[in-house]
Amino acid sequence: MASVFKDLKIVQLSDLHIGSKLSAPIDQTLNILSELKPDLILLTGDYIEWNGNKVAYDNAIDFLSHLSAPLGVYAVMGDSDYSFPRRSCGFCHEEGSAHPPTQHQVKFLRNSQSVIEMEGGKISIIGIGRDSDYDSGSKTINNMLIDNPAIVLSHFSLAYNNINKDKNVLVLSGDTHGGQIFLPEFIWKIIKRKPDTEHKYGLYREEKKSLYVTSGIGTSDIPFRLGVPPEVVLFEFME
């Protein structure tokens, strides 16, 4: 994977939880992207606040419209994105149509992949859908991981647990907010606040496969963070 992405900047964004009023972290995120000028942007879900109204969805779509990168912008949905079903479809396609929306250039993946070709070789970007897709999605991933190294986008880190450890793959996830409020690891595991208590935040490795769980950008349930700052994740690969 390093030979393919050498000298490139890859950014991961997650858990923006955009509401009816845009917050400072959203503006700061766009400013950071403008400074970084990433070659590839990867999104791992929860663009909208829980049970967001039409204004919140419009704001989220507007945020996506500002994202562009030479190698593309790829995304999966998070659980909060489905909390208003009549609006959630608008992320992926025009209303009443299978055509992608015209408002943004983000390509949403659900148990599907796109292959990026570069001088150093090919790499697959694989996206897994909502939590109900994980059984079929895990089979899909392992079937796709044949020749090319891959980056798997999955809002929940559960997908990582079901990938064969001999696969050359990097899984990118969010959902946890890194805890949002700092708690010792053993308390996090006891309260079982999220589906995968083994992977709260940071980089994990097992043989050839790797996982990065980001703390994300926004908040949910309570409107603040404590001891767990938001982040825009920058990946740079070196051989």
Image (spheres, rainbow, N blue to C red):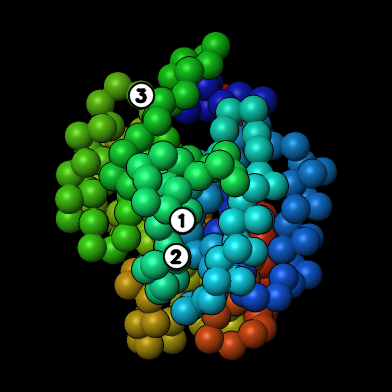
Mark 2 and mark 1: span between their CA atoms? 6 Å
Q: Amino acid at mark 1?
A: Gly
State if disc 1 and disc 2 touch (CB < 8 Å).
yes
Type of amino acid under label 2: Arg
Which of 70/189 is in front?
70
Q: Quadrant of residue 130?
A: bottom left
Q: Position of residue 112 (x, y in %)?
A: 31, 39
Which structural element holds mark 3? loop
In percent of width and height, residue 19 lies at: 62, 74
Mark 1 vs 3: CB contact within 8 A: no
List x then y, in percent, for residue 151.
Answer: 43, 38
Residue at mark 3 = 148
- Please give the name of the residue rendered at 77% of the width and 61% of the height, measured from the top-left corner: 27
Q: Is residue 121 left or right of residue 30?
A: left
* Residue picked out by circle 1: 90
Task: Residue under label 2, please give it.
Answer: 87
In primary-sequence order, the first of circles 2 and 3 is 2
Give the structural element (helix, strand or loop) at label 2: helix
Residue 74 to residue 4: above or below: below
**In the picture shown, does residue 46 fall above or below 41?**
below
Residue at 33%, 47% in the rendered image: 110
Which residue appears at 37% of the width and 88% of the height? 191
